[in-house]
Amino acid sequence: MPNYTIIHKQDVFLEEKYVPQLKGDETYLSRSFELHFNERPFLHHTCYLFITKTKKESSRMQSNFSILCRGRLIPHEITDPNVVQGFLESVDQFQQIVNDSGQVRLERLSTDDIVGTSEKAGLLERYFALFDKDANTLQDIQMSAEELRIGDQILCVHTLSDVDDLPGEVATDSRYGRYSTERSECRLSFAAPIGLLLNCNHVVNQYVFIDDPSETLERFERLARNLHSLSKYSRANQINRQWIEAYLNEAHSFSLTAVRCHCNVMAWADNRERLKVIKNDTGSALALLGCKPRYNTVDAPTLFWGAIPGGEGEFPAEESFHTFIEQAVCFWIEETNYRDSLSPFGIKMVDRMSGRPLHVDISDLPMQRGIIANRNKFVLGGSGSGKSFCMNHLLRQY
């Protein structure tokens, strides 16, 4: 990606209830199976990735200045055709690399998907309504030093914006004890506790700010020299110089790219009792990462404004911290919901997290993709683990 680019990953988790899929010609067992899961709650996950090109001055933008104070929304530098063309080519290459990996697939949003149409609300309109299904109705936004309210919903915002709030070490994945045993491990992403494991309506915003790495390192070099000259006046200056030199040594030794990072969790509820529970759950989820939960009140509107799709250039610089790309992406959520198979042929299973029914094809679709070479089945389990029940269920579905 070119310099002064912001990569914003936004994960939206909304509470929904299962709706039975009845066509009218089901058997008694199939109908009873669907009605058994009627209105079962689960979290619906949607992931957006916004790539925004900004200018050099945006990397130093403070929270006391807003785009609303300017007469021009788009900077003159961004309207340069060569700059725009180079940025779009970089985005296309990024999309192709991700899609070719076979693990994740990116679908580019159209203009109607972003701004909406007369019949359907767009992404921007849904964001200002907290992704409510009735987003066609405008919601009042009330901002104060005590709380941020949108319609009937009250928001609470927790941030990771300071190095002092982070754990000593981060990793790409971690052990999930609930589904792990002494002989086997279930690995989830490092940030999984603030994803599907946080059972409430919430949005997780993860930012990576790509400035000019060489200029960033040069600025740290100057700062280290200044702290060295002032180290005899204060021990704090000496300690800070050592930390900066360790950062510079790491960058030069392993050729790492210096970036800025930020992560926040926005949760909401329609009453203060429920909000208090959600606030405690969110803080506990961040504590599971080894982080120090920081609850924001005064700057919550600024963070909400900086998470607008395409408005990442207005994110306040003081809410980010310096790190490297490898450590920054450790705070990205990698899990999502299990989804129904596209094949019409399959069996009914349930999501182990929420118990929501799923349509799973374990025969035809894997064979079409080349995952398996035949349709043989082998069921392995201890006594009383449900082998016979599984085979009876499989035969009945087939």
Image (cartoon, grey):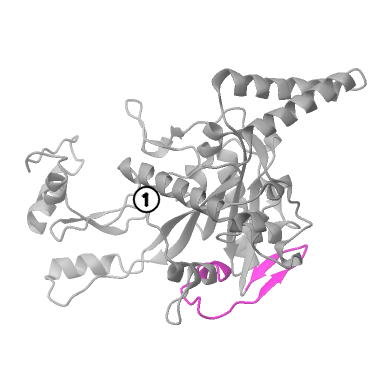
Q: Is residue 143 magenta?
A: yes
Q: Residue at x 55, y 20 (%)?
A: 254
Q: Is residue 242 above or below residue 205?
A: above
Q: Residue at the far right: name it.
A: 233
Pinpoint residue 373: horizontal percent, then vertical percent.
8, 38
Q: Is residue 225 above or below residue 66?
A: above
Q: Residue at x 70, y 58 (%)?
A: 302
Q: Nearer the viewer, residue 164 or 311?
A: 311
Q: Nearer the viewer, residue 162 or 2?
A: 2
Pinpoint residue 13: horizontal percent, then vertical percent.
47, 58
- Identify the image quadrant of the C terminus: bottom left
Q: Is residue 144 magenta?
A: yes
Q: Is the magenta region chiefly helix, strand or loop?
A: loop
The quarter of the displayed image where residue 130 is located? bottom right
Q: Nearer the viewer, residue 307 or 352?
A: 307
Q: Residue at x 66, y 65 (%)?
A: 73
* Residue 145 falls left or right of residue 44: right
* Residue 354 falls left or right of residue 236: left
Question: Does the rendering let one see residue 335?
Answer: no
Dot 1 falls on a residue whose secondary structure is loop
Q: Amino acid at mark 1?
A: Met
Q: Is residue 41 above or below residue 23?
A: above
The quarter of the displayed image where residue 314 is located? bottom right
Pinpoint residue 220: horizontal percent, then vertical percent.
73, 28
* Residue 200 falls left or right of residue 376: right
Disc 1 designates what residue?
Answer: 353
Q: How many marks?
A: 1
Question: Does the rendering let one see residue 118?
Answer: yes
The quarter of the displayed image where residue 374 is located? top left
* Residue 39 falls left or right of residue 233: left
Q: Say few, some or many: other residues with alpha carbon within 10 Å of mark 1 (under 14 / 14 to 19 / 20 or more).
A: few
Q: Which residues are magenta?
A: 126-150
